[in-house]
Image: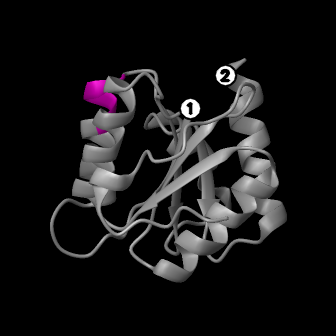
Amino acid sequence: MSNTLTAPHIAHHQAPQVGQTNILVVDDEQAMQILASALIERLGHASHAVGSGEEAIDAFKMAKETDQPYGVVVMDLALPGGISGLEATIALKQIDPDVKIIVSSGYLEQNARNAALENGFAGILPKPYTGERLASELRYVLKKSD
C-alpha cells in the first residue's frame, strides 16, 4: 500500500519495521509519488511521499522527533513555487548533516553523478526513471551508508 500524502501532519501513521529503511519521496507529481512509493515498498522499505519542499522539511523534522528518521530522501529538484528541491536539501542537511539524499530531476544528465556527489548528494536519479533504476540507486546509497 502506498503512503502518498497530502499533508505533512499524517506523514508517520506507519512506522518502519525492523530492518526497513524509512524513505521520503519528495515530488510534486502525484503519479511519481505513487510509483516511487510502490517500488520502495516492493523493495521491503517503508515509504512516505510529500509534494513540496515545505512538506519535506516538516515530515523530516517530525520523523526525527519521533525517532523514526528517514534513512534516504529521494528529492525532486524541480518543485514549483515555495521552497525548491535544492533549498529543501540544504534545510534537511542543516537538520541532519548525514542525511542521504538522492537527487531526482528531468534536467540531469546521465553523467552528472560526480557533480551531484561533489555537491553532497548521495545519489542521482535522472527522470524519467524505471523501477530497476530506482532500485539500483537505492541499493547503491544504502550499501554506501553501511
Q: Residues within 10 Å of mark 1 (few under 14, many from 20)?
A: some
Q: Is residue 121 above or below residue 39?
A: above
Magenta part of the chain: 92-96
Quadrant assignment, res 93: top left
Quadrant assignment, res 114: top right
Q: Could you tell whether 52 is left or right of 133 in the image? A: left
**Circle 1 sits in a helix, a strand or a loop, which is it?**
loop
Q: In the rendered image, which residue does mark 2 sit on?
A: 145
**Circle 2 sits in a helix, a strand or a loop, which is it?**
helix
Residue 76 image position (x, y, % from top left):
44, 63
Query: In the rendered image, which quarter contains the C terminus?
Result: top right
Q: In the rendered image, which residue does mark 1 sit on?
A: 71
Query: In the rendered image, which quarter contains the N terminus?
Result: bottom right
Question: What is the three-letter code of the residue carrying label 1?
Answer: Gly
Of 8 and 30, nearer the camera is 8
Q: Are marks 2 and 1 in contact (CB under 8 Å)?
A: yes
- Residue 95 badge: none
Name the magenta segment's main secondary structure: helix
